[in-house]
Amino acid sequence: MRIDPNQQRVFEAFARRNGRPLSPWQKIVGSVAAIGLFGLALVFSVVVFAVVLTVGAAVWGWFWWKTRNLRKQMRETQAQQQAQEGLVIEGEVIREVDEPDDRRA
Protein backbone atom coordinates (compact mmCIF):
# COMPACT_ATOMS: atom_id res chain seq x y z
CA MET A 1 0.00 0.00 0.00
CA ARG A 2 1.39 3.37 -1.02
CA ILE A 3 1.54 6.11 1.64
CA ASP A 4 1.14 9.69 0.48
CA PRO A 5 4.08 11.80 1.79
CA ASN A 6 1.86 14.88 2.28
CA GLN A 7 -0.50 12.97 4.56
CA GLN A 8 2.43 11.49 6.46
CA ARG A 9 3.83 14.99 7.12
CA VAL A 10 0.47 16.15 8.54
CA PHE A 11 0.34 13.26 11.01
CA GLU A 12 3.98 13.72 11.99
CA ALA A 13 3.30 17.40 12.67
CA PHE A 14 0.48 16.46 15.06
CA ALA A 15 2.70 13.91 16.77
CA ARG A 16 5.71 16.21 17.20
CA ARG A 17 4.02 19.60 17.59
CA ASN A 18 7.04 20.95 15.72
CA GLY A 19 9.36 19.71 18.45
CA ARG A 20 8.00 22.07 21.13
CA PRO A 21 6.65 20.63 24.39
CA LEU A 22 3.39 21.97 25.79
CA SER A 23 3.68 24.99 28.06
CA PRO A 24 2.16 24.88 31.56
CA TRP A 25 -0.59 27.26 30.40
CA GLN A 26 -1.49 24.92 27.51
CA LYS A 27 -1.54 21.97 29.91
CA ILE A 28 -3.88 23.83 32.29
CA VAL A 29 -6.22 24.93 29.50
CA GLY A 30 -6.20 21.42 28.04
CA SER A 31 -7.00 19.87 31.44
CA VAL A 32 -9.83 22.34 32.11
CA ALA A 33 -11.23 21.73 28.63
CA ALA A 34 -11.06 17.94 29.14
CA ILE A 35 -12.79 18.18 32.54
CA GLY A 36 -15.44 20.49 31.07
CA LEU A 37 -16.01 18.15 28.15
CA PHE A 38 -16.32 15.20 30.54
CA GLY A 39 -18.82 17.13 32.67
CA LEU A 40 -20.84 18.08 29.60
CA ALA A 41 -20.91 14.45 28.46
CA LEU A 42 -22.02 13.35 31.93
CA VAL A 43 -24.85 15.91 32.02
CA PHE A 44 -25.93 14.93 28.51
CA SER A 45 -26.00 11.24 29.42
CA VAL A 46 -28.08 11.92 32.56
CA VAL A 47 -30.56 13.98 30.52
CA VAL A 48 -30.81 11.26 27.87
CA PHE A 49 -31.35 8.62 30.58
CA ALA A 50 -34.09 10.72 32.21
CA VAL A 51 -35.83 11.26 28.85
CA VAL A 52 -35.68 7.54 27.99
CA LEU A 53 -36.97 6.61 31.44
CA THR A 54 -39.84 9.11 31.19
CA VAL A 55 -40.83 8.02 27.69
CA GLY A 56 -40.66 4.36 28.77
CA ALA A 57 -42.89 5.03 31.79
CA ALA A 58 -45.36 6.92 29.60
CA VAL A 59 -45.51 4.10 27.04
CA TRP A 60 -45.96 1.51 29.81
CA GLY A 61 -48.75 3.59 31.38
CA TRP A 62 -50.50 4.03 28.03
CA PHE A 63 -50.25 0.28 27.31
CA TRP A 64 -51.53 -0.56 30.82
CA TRP A 65 -54.46 1.85 30.36
CA LYS A 66 -55.37 0.50 26.91
CA THR A 67 -55.35 -3.14 28.08
CA ARG A 68 -57.39 -2.66 31.27
CA ASN A 69 -60.66 -3.88 29.68
CA LEU A 70 -58.92 -6.98 28.33
CA ARG A 71 -57.49 -7.80 31.77
CA LYS A 72 -60.94 -7.33 33.32
CA GLN A 73 -62.52 -9.68 30.76
CA MET A 74 -59.82 -12.28 31.39
CA ARG A 75 -60.44 -12.16 35.16
CA GLU A 76 -64.20 -12.49 34.66
CA THR A 77 -63.79 -15.40 32.23
CA GLN A 78 -61.45 -17.18 34.63
CA ALA A 79 -63.88 -16.68 37.51
CA GLN A 80 -66.75 -18.08 35.42
CA GLN A 81 -64.74 -21.13 34.43
CA GLN A 82 -63.78 -21.82 38.02
CA ALA A 83 -67.42 -21.48 39.11
CA GLN A 84 -68.53 -23.96 36.44
CA GLU A 85 -65.80 -26.54 36.94
CA GLY A 86 -65.13 -26.18 40.62
CA LEU A 87 -61.70 -25.79 42.13
CA VAL A 88 -59.05 -27.56 40.07
CA ILE A 89 -55.66 -28.14 41.60
CA GLU A 90 -53.16 -29.71 39.27
CA GLY A 91 -50.99 -32.49 40.59
CA GLU A 92 -50.81 -36.20 41.15
CA VAL A 93 -53.31 -38.25 43.07
CA ILE A 94 -52.36 -41.56 44.57
CA ARG A 95 -55.33 -43.65 45.53
CA GLU A 96 -55.39 -47.04 47.14
CA VAL A 97 -58.03 -49.34 45.78
CA ASP A 98 -59.19 -52.33 47.81
CA GLU A 99 -58.89 -55.40 45.67
CA PRO A 100 -61.69 -57.91 46.01
CA ASP A 101 -60.67 -60.71 48.30
CA ASP A 102 -61.03 -64.00 46.47
CA ARG A 103 -60.73 -65.93 49.70
CA ARG A 104 -64.15 -64.80 50.92
CA ALA A 105 -65.97 -66.56 48.16
Image (spheres, rainbow, N blue to C red):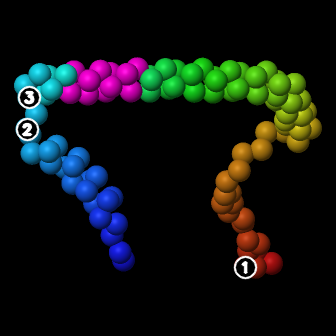
**Residue type highlighted by circle 3:** Ser
Q: Nearer the viewer, mark 3 or mark 1?
A: 3
Q: Nearer the viewer, mark 1 or mark 2?
A: 2
Q: Which residue is mark 3?
A: 23
Answer whether residue 58 is visible to the viewer in this image: yes
For the point 21% across and 54% down, the residue is 12
Q: Which residue is mark 1?
A: 103
**Residue type highlighted by circle 1:** Arg
- The residues tagged by marks 3 and 2 sit, at their Cα atoms, a distance apart of 6 Å
Tell me if label 1 and label 2 are in contact, CB under 8 Å: no
- 73 is higher (above) or lower (below) than 21: above
Q: Magenta stretch mostly in which secondary structure?
A: helix
Which of the 4 quarters of the picture holds residue 62?
A: top right
Apparent side of residue 76 relative to residue 100 in the rendered image (left or right): right
* Quadrant in which the C terminus is drawn: bottom right
Question: Residue 24, labelled with which disc?
Answer: none
Which of the 4 quarters of the picture holds residue 35?
A: top left
Q: Is residue 8 magenta?
A: no
Residue 100 percent coordinates (x, y):
77, 72
- The residues tagged by marks 3 and 1 sit, at their Cα atoms, a distance apart of 114 Å
> Tag 1's secondary structure?
loop
In the orientation shown, which residue stands out farthest toward the front? Answer: 6
Q: Nearer the viewer, residue 59 or 105?
A: 59
Apparent side of residue 38 relative to residue 89 in the rendered image (left or right): left
For the point 88% across and 42% down, the residue is 85
Tell me if label 3 and label 1 are in contact, CB under 8 Å: no
Residue range highlighted in magenta:
30-43
Tell me if label 3 and label 2 are in contact, CB under 8 Å: yes
What is the crowding at mark 1: few (fewer than 14 residues within 10 Å), some, or many (at least 20)? Answer: few
Q: Which residue is mark 2?
A: 21
- 63 is higher (above) or lower (below) than 18: above
- 15 is higher (above) or lower (below) than 98: above
